[in-house]
Amino acid sequence: MIEYRNLRIALLGAGSVGSQVARLLLENRDELAARVGAGLDLIGVAVRDIDAPRDTAIPRELLTTDASTLIQSADIVIELMGGIEPARQYIQLAIASGADVVTGNKALLATHGPELFDAADRVGAQLYYEAAAGGAIPIIRPLRDSLAGDRVDRVMGIVNGTTNFILDRMDVEGDTFENALAVATELGYAEADPTADVEGFDAAQKAAILASLAFHTAVPVESVHREGMTTVTAAQIDSAQKAGYVVKLLAICERLVDPETGIEGVVARVHPALISRMHPLAAVHGAKNAVFVQAEAAGDLMFYGAGAGGVETASAVLGDLVSAARRHVAGGPGTGESTHANLPILGIGAVITRYQLTLIVTDKPGVLAQIAGLFSEHGVSVEAVQQTVATASAAGSASESDALTATLVIVTHEATEAALAATVAAVSANDAVVRVESVLRVEGETP
Ligand code: NDP
Ligand code: HSE
């Protein structure tokens, strides 16, 4: 049997994920060596502060603040520092030095992915990033490898654990957004500044990564339509429940034909949406993540698990490390990101979906017919209507309380964003409409 020399592994970052990677790499040395066919020597761990407290003990002699020197002595560099700089220049340095790279840095890949993939491609290096979307969930490799012979039409995921935890608590416990966020912070799911999660920035980065892979097209994060979930109210959750839906923050990446231009392209979007309680994504509770993939030949697939967490994410990083190390031993080409399809990126206006509108209207004869007429005028077909008569206290303002009002919850059949926007404008301008309480998209047929 051929004996291979040990591979030199450099780790950049020893925070939540990095410290667990270091621990598992040291504890499972023999097992990993057997799987790779060569030993994996952790030659150093770059950090900002050598004396900072760590989740797990790392031998002090491995810690260094000199990342550049460490990188240049490595066969494989694992980047788990996060942020754009200096992570970007360290990955470039690793590639230029002939090393392969494993990273979990979604912010960096969503903004500078093409530049890094090109650099790796030019020298035949590998750039693995299973941890960058969905934490522990294997989703990058299935999209890149397992489905490489299929045609993916849609990827719809719950890719942010913090927001799923909040929305799930609002749904199951009847909590308000503020209370649910406070619990998420107390339990360590939400950061001190939860903006990236609740405003959908984190999910948009993951959507850009998933869309790029699924559709063989570079999808920049700026092109992802993003709406946060801070405006979701307990009333909307309640109304969704009554209609058999649950509200989730969804990242949706789809291949579609723009109804205006006839051009086929890709749309990626992140926003709160209603989904049927019968849909597999509705069963994703707490801080868990899941990605639902629809492919032409494979049909519907779902990938479920922990989207974050130090040790859980370390599993994905080590999987990448073993793959990279095996190629070092066996040889062969780099991973190579395929962007050959180069589909146009379409705006949210190209999306065709269903909607749920909640309207507060004056309760008098003919109002329902008038509203139905406005939907019909704009080519939006109504699927279901539910009316409840509001109490005076629920009416919202002094003038409203003079007249009897009703709440109309209308679910539409599929319509374009443009037709829906025109309908909402017409409905808002109608004298019988006190206000448009909410408009939410309804996603995913019940499989
Ligand atoms: P942490 O903030 O916990 O750790 C960051 C580490 O990087 C620290 O050890 C820090 O050093 C080190 N570091 C930061 N800047 C520098 C620098 N300029 N030079 C040297 N070292 C530096 O991050 P996480 O472990 O949470 O995340 C790491 C990556 O993994 C990120 O890209 C994140 O998006 C991704 N990820 C994280 C998940 C999670 O659940 N945490 C899930 C999926 C992906 P020091 O300790 O000295 O401060
Ligand atoms: N903050 C993210 C979440 C975890 O709540 O899912 C890292 O992507």
Image (tube, helix red, strand yellow):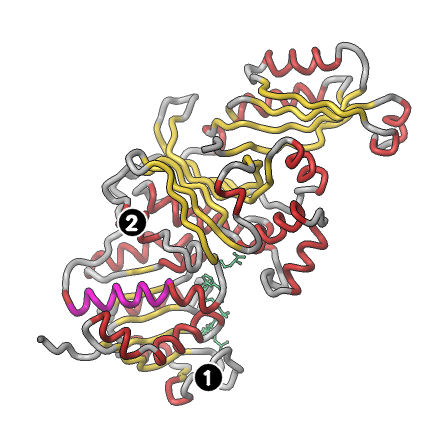
Residue 244 colored magenta? Answer: no
Q: Name the residue under label 2.
A: 144
Q: Which of 212 and 295 is in front in this view?
A: 295
For the residue pair 306 and 374, the one nearer the viewer reads as 306
Quarter that holds the N terminus: bottom left
Horizontal and vertical percent for residue 221? 44, 47
Q: Name the residue under label 1.
A: 57
Q: In what element is the residue under mark 2? A: helix
Res. 421 image quadrant: top right
Could you tell me which residue is drawn at 65 percent across and 14 percent down?
A: 372
Residue 276, image x and y in percent? 55, 35
How would you rate the neighbour count of disc 1 (Cα within 10 Å): few for under 14, some for 14-19, many for 20 or more? few
Determine the image quadrant of residue 356.
top right
Q: What residue type is labelled 2?
A: Arg
Q: The C terminus lies in which quarter of the figure?
A: top left
What span is colored magenta in the figure? Answer: 316-329
Q: In this view, does 7 lie to the left or right of 234?
A: left
- Residue type at the position of mark 1: Ala
Q: In this view, does 44 lie above or below 37?
A: below
One can see residue 96 in this view? no
Q: Which residue occupies 25% across, 61% down?
A: 126
Q: In terms of secondary structure, where does tag 1 sit?
A: loop
Residue reaching furthest bottom? 61
Q: Residue 358 carries which label?
A: none
Q: In this view, does 241 lie above or below 212?
A: above
